[in-house]
Amino acid sequence: MIEIRSVRKTFGPLEVLKGISLDVNKGELLCLLGASGSGKSTLLQCINGLEPIQGGEIVVDGVSVHDSKTNINTLRRKLGIVFQQYNAFPHLTALENVALAPRVVAKRGRAEARALAQKHLDHVGLGSKAGSLPSRMSGGQQQRLAIARALAMEPSYMLFDEVTSALDPELVGEVLETMRLLKGEGMTMVVVTHDIGFARESADRVAFLHQGEVCEIGTAADLIDNPQKSQTQKFLRRERQVPLAAVERTVA
Amino acid sequence: MQFQFAQQGLTWHDTYFLAEGLLNTIQLAASATAVGTIGGVVLGWVRTVSVTARVATTPIVDILRSVPMIIQLILANSFLSIMGFSTSPFIFGTVALGAWMSAVTAEVVRAGLLSVPSHYRKSARSLGMNRLQELVHISFPLAFRTALAPWINLVLSLIKDSALAGVIGYVEYMRATQTLITRTHETWILLLGAGLLYFIICYPVSKYSRRLERKIAV
Amino acid sequence: MNGYHFYWSMVWPSLPLMLAGAWVTIQLTFLAFIIGTLIALPMAVARQEGEGWAYRFATAWVELARNTPAVFQLFVFYFGFGALHINIPSYTAVLISVSFNNAGYMTEIFRGGLSAIPRQQLSAARSLGMNSLQGFLHVIFPQMFKVIFLAYITQGIWGMLNTSLGMLVGLQDLTGATQYAQSVSFRTFEFFIVAAGMYYLIAKGLQFSALVAFRLMYRS
C-alpha cells in the first residue's frame, strides 16, 4: 500500500503540493486528474523519490521514501514508472532496453536477463520488435516498451505519467490496451492522465487535484458522473468540451 | 671530401631527421591526448555534479584558455625543472598540452552530459540503478555520441599546437623543419612539406568526423 | 623545493618593456580581428553559394587556415617571403598571418550564422529597394552577428593567443618582450607568470568590451 501523508513540495518560491494526503490500495487503479500545474506529475515523481519533499511523508509498503536511511535503489524496484516521453533508451535495442536493469540491478545472468526481456516484450505484444532500436518504433510501441521494461523488474506498483499525452491519436489505443491488460492481471496502478474516458471505464477510484491539493476523490463513476465540487465540475466540463469543440470546428 | 659548412643543401640524411621529428610529434600528441582526455572526462563530469565544483574549477579552465600555448609550455618547462620533477621536454610538453586538453575536453564532456535528456536518467534511476550504473550505462554512452565530433576537433587543435613544442627544446616536426631551413635555406620545399604533413593529418580527419557524427547519432 | 627562491622583485624593472609588448599584442589583436572580419564577410557569402570561383577560393583559404598550425602560417609569411627576397618585418608578418588565420575561421563562423537566417530576408530587403550590398549590410549581417557573437569573440581571443608566436620571429610583443627581459636574469618562471597574468587580463578586457559593445548594439 502507498500512503501519502500531508505532503508539501516547493520549487523555489512556488508551492506545488500543499499538504496532499492520499492512499493507494493494493490492486486498485487510481487515476489522478487535474489541470496543468495542479501537481499531479510532481506527486508521481515524489512517490518513487525522484523529487524530494519539503513536508509530510510518503510510505510504500511500510518504508518511508524520503528517509535518508532508506535504500532508495532497492525501494525503486517495487515502483515502476513510465513517463510521457523520452522513455526508451535510444542507444539500445528493445531487448537490451528491457534486459538492462535485470542484469545490472537484479544481478541476473546475461542469458537469463535476455530470456526474461523477451518474455516481457511478448507480454505487451512487442515480441517481434526485440532487435529493433527505439528510433525504428512508433511512439505507441516505445511507450509499450517502457512499460515492459518497468515490468521486467517485477514491481508491486506501476506509476504512469500522462503516457498517452504526447502520442498521435491512433497510437493511444494500443497503450491503453496494455494498461487494461495490466489491470486485469491485478497490478496496482497510479495513472496521471487527461483521458477522462479511460478514467471513467478503467479506474477504480479517481482523485481530482486542484492547485496542489486533493479537491475531490471517489469512485470513478461517482466523481466523473456526479462531481460535487465546483472546481471538479468546471474541469470536467472543460475537458469534455475540448474534443467536441475541435470536431465542430473541423466540420464547419 | 668537400668541407662545406655553410649552405649545405638537403641530403637524404635530412629525411631521417624529419621522420624523427614526425615521430616526436606523434608521440607528444598521443601522450597529451591520453592525459588530457582522461583528465577532461573526470573534470567534465565533476563540473556537472555540483555548482560549487563548477565555480571552483572555472578559474583554472578559463586561465588555460586565455594564455598562449607558448607561455604554457615555457611555464611547464621552468616550473617542473625548478621543482626537480623532470628535465625532459617530452614531459614538459605533455604536461602543458595535457593540461590544456583537460580544460577544453572538460567543457565538451560537460556539454555532452548536459545534453542527455533528464527523463532517460530518471528512467534509469527509477529502475533501481544507482548513480554509477546510470552514468555507465545511460549518460556516458549518450553523451559520448554528442561529444565525439567536438573532441576530435580538439585533438586536431592539439596536433597543431604541438608544433610549438620546439620552443622548449622538443624536436618535433616543425622544429625539425625550422632547423633545416636555417641550415639549408631550402625554405619553400621544407615549408611545403610541413604544411602538407599537418594538412594531410587534419583535413581528412575533420571531414570524416562530420560523417562519423551522423553515423553514430541516435 | 631545492632551495629555489622566487625573485619577484626582478620582474618590476622590466615591467615597462613588458607593457610596451602588451601594447603591441593589443594592437595586433585588434587589427587582425578587423582585417579578418572584413575578409571573412564576403568569403562567407561566397561559401554559401556552394559553387563558382569565389566559392572555391574561399574554401581553399578556409581549409588551409584551419588545417595547418598557426606557426606554420607565420613561417610561410616570414621565412617563405624572406626566401623570395621579400623581407617582411616581423610585426607585419604576424599581422598578415593572424589575419589570414582569423579570416579562415571567421568565414566558417559567419557561414554558420548565415545559414540560420532565412533566404527570404535578402529578397525582402531587395524588394524594399536595397541592392544586394545594402541588403547584406543593413539586414543580413546585423542578424548574423547577433547569432554568432560568442564564437566570433572567442575567435578574436584565439587571434590574440596567436600573436604570441611573434616571439619566434623576433617580435617584441608581450611574449617576445618577456623572453628578452628574462634572458638577462633567467628568472623564466617569474617573468612568464606575470606575462601569463597580463594575457589573462587582456583577454578578460576584450571579453568585457565585447559584452558592452553587444549590449549597446543590440539594445532592443
Image (spheres, coloured by chain):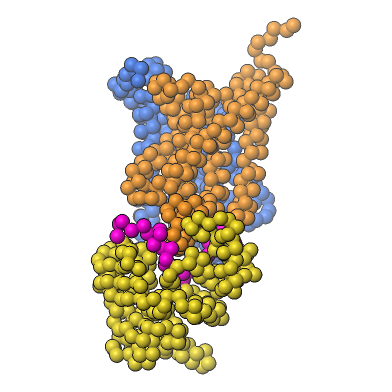
Chain colours: A yellow, B orange, C blue
Q: In this orientation, which residue lies closer to the viewer: B80 or C7?
A: B80
Look at the image and tell me whether residue B96 can be seen. Answer: yes
- Which residue corresponds to the image point at 35% horizontal and 76% vertical from the top-left? A24
- Which residue corresponds to the image point at 35% horizontal and 50% vertical from the top-left? B50
Q: Quadrant of residue B26?
A: top right
Q: In which quarter of the image is residue B176?
A: top right
Q: How many labels does the image show?
A: 0
- Which residue corresponds to the image point at 46% horizontal and 29% vertical from the top-left? B73
Residue B150 is inside the magenta segment: no
Q: Is residue B129 left or right of residue C122?
A: left
Q: In this orientation, which residue lies closer to the viewer: A167 or C99?
A: A167
Image coords of residue C179 (percent x, y)? 43, 23
Q: Is residue C161 left or right of residue A7?
A: right
Q: Could you tell me which quadrant the N terminus of chain C lies in?
A: top left
Image coords of residue A21 (percent x, y)? 28, 75
Q: In which quarter of the image is residue C75?
A: top right
Q: In this orientation, which residue lies closer to the viewer: A88 or A189?
A: A189
Q: In this orientation, which residue lies closer to the viewer: C128 or C168?
A: C168
Image coords of residue B72 (percent x, y)? 44, 31
Q: In this view, does A93 lie to the left or right of B102?
A: right
Q: Could you tell me which quadrant the C terminus of chain C lies in?
A: bottom left
Residue A85 is inside the magenta segment: yes
Image coords of residue A239 (percent x, y)? 40, 86
* Above-or-below relation of C155 to A157: above
Look at the image and tell me whether residue A87 can be seen. Answer: no
Residue that protrudes farthest toward the right in the picture: B1
The range drawn in magenta is: A67-94
- Which residue corresponds to the image point at 37% horizontal and 80% vertical from the top-left? A33
Q: In this view, does B200 lie to the left or right of A174?
A: right
Report the magenta stretch's main SS. loop
